[in-house]
Image (cartoon, rainbow, N blue to C red):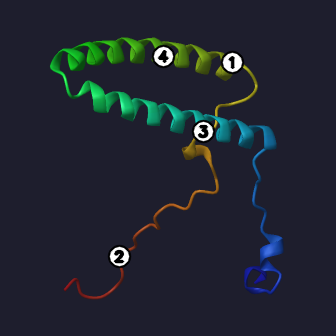
C-alpha cells in the first residue's frame, strides 16, 4: 500500500490556498483584532454608567443591523460572481473529530 511507504507524504496532495485569498484572510483577522480591542475598551467605560450603557446598547444594535445588511449585500454580489466565499467549513485542511464506531463485545 502506498500510504505506508517512505514517500507516502509526497504522494498526498494538500491544496494550498491562493496567496491573494490568504492575504485577504490575514487582513480580515487583523481588522477583527483591532475592532475587538477598541470594543473592549469602549465596553469597559460604558459599563460604568447606566445611561451610557443604554445608549451604547441601542447604538450597537443599530450598527449591527447596518453592517449585517452591508455584509449580506456584499456576500450576495460575491455569490453571483465566479468566486465563492471561503469559510472554515469549506476548508479541507480542518481536522474534525473521528467518527465513533461501536466495538463488538459486551456493553459493560
Determine the CA span between mark 3 and mark 4.
18 Å
Which quarter of the figure has residue 60? Answer: top left
Which quarter of the figure has residue 20? Answer: top right
In this view, the mark in front (2 or 1): 1
The tag on residue 80 is 1
Give whichever of discs 3 and 4 has the lower sequence position.
Answer: 3
Determine the CA span between mark 2 and mark 1.
44 Å
Give whichever of discs 2 and 1 has the lower sequence position.
Answer: 1
**Residue 29 at x, y percent in the picture:** 58, 39
Please give the residue where the numbered disc 2 appears in the rendered image: 102
Q: Are marks 3 and 4 in contact (CB under 8 Å)?
A: no
Quarter of the figure that contains the N terminus = bottom right
Q: Are marks 2 and 1 in contact (CB under 8 Å)?
A: no
Give whichever of discs 2 and 3 has the lower sequence position.
Answer: 3
Residue sitting at x 73%, y 85%: 4
Determine the CA span between mark 4 and mark 1.
20 Å
Q: Helix, strand or loop at disc 2?
A: loop
In this view, the mark in front (2 or 3): 3
In this view, the mark in front (2 or 4): 4
The tag on residue 67 is 4
Give whichever of discs 4 and 1 has the lower sequence position.
Answer: 4
> Is 34 located above or below residue 100 in the figure?
above
> Is 97 located above or below residue 35 in the figure?
below
Please give the residue where the numbered disc 3 appears in the rendered image: 30
Side (left or right) of 70 relative to 26: left
Q: Helix, strand or loop at disc 1?
A: helix
Determine the CA span between mark 2 and mark 4.
46 Å
Task: Using a 10 Å C-alpha cutoff, classify the residue at mark 4 as few (fewer than 14 neighbours), some (14 to 19) or many (20 or more).
Answer: few
**Residue 64 at x, y percent in the picture:** 40, 18
Amino acid at each position: 500500500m502506498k500510504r505506508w511507504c517512505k514517500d507516502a507524504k509526497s504522494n498526498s496532495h494538500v491544496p494550498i490556498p491562493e496567496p491573494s485569498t490568504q492575504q485577504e484572510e490575514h487582513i480580515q483577522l487583523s481588522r477583527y483584532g483591532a475592532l475587538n480591542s477598541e470594543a473592549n475598551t469602549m465596553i469597559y467605560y460604558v459599563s460604568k454608567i447606566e445611561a451610557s450603557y443604554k445608549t451604547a446598547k441601542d447604538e450597537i444594535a443599530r450598527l449591527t443591523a447596518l453592517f449585517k445588511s452591508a455584509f449580506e449585500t456584499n456576500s450576495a454580489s460575491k455569490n453571483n460572481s465566479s468566486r465563492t466565499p471561503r469559510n472554515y467549513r469549506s476548508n479541507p485542511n480542518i481536522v474534525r473529530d473521528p467518527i465513533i464506531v461501536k466495538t463488538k463485545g459486551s456493553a459493560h
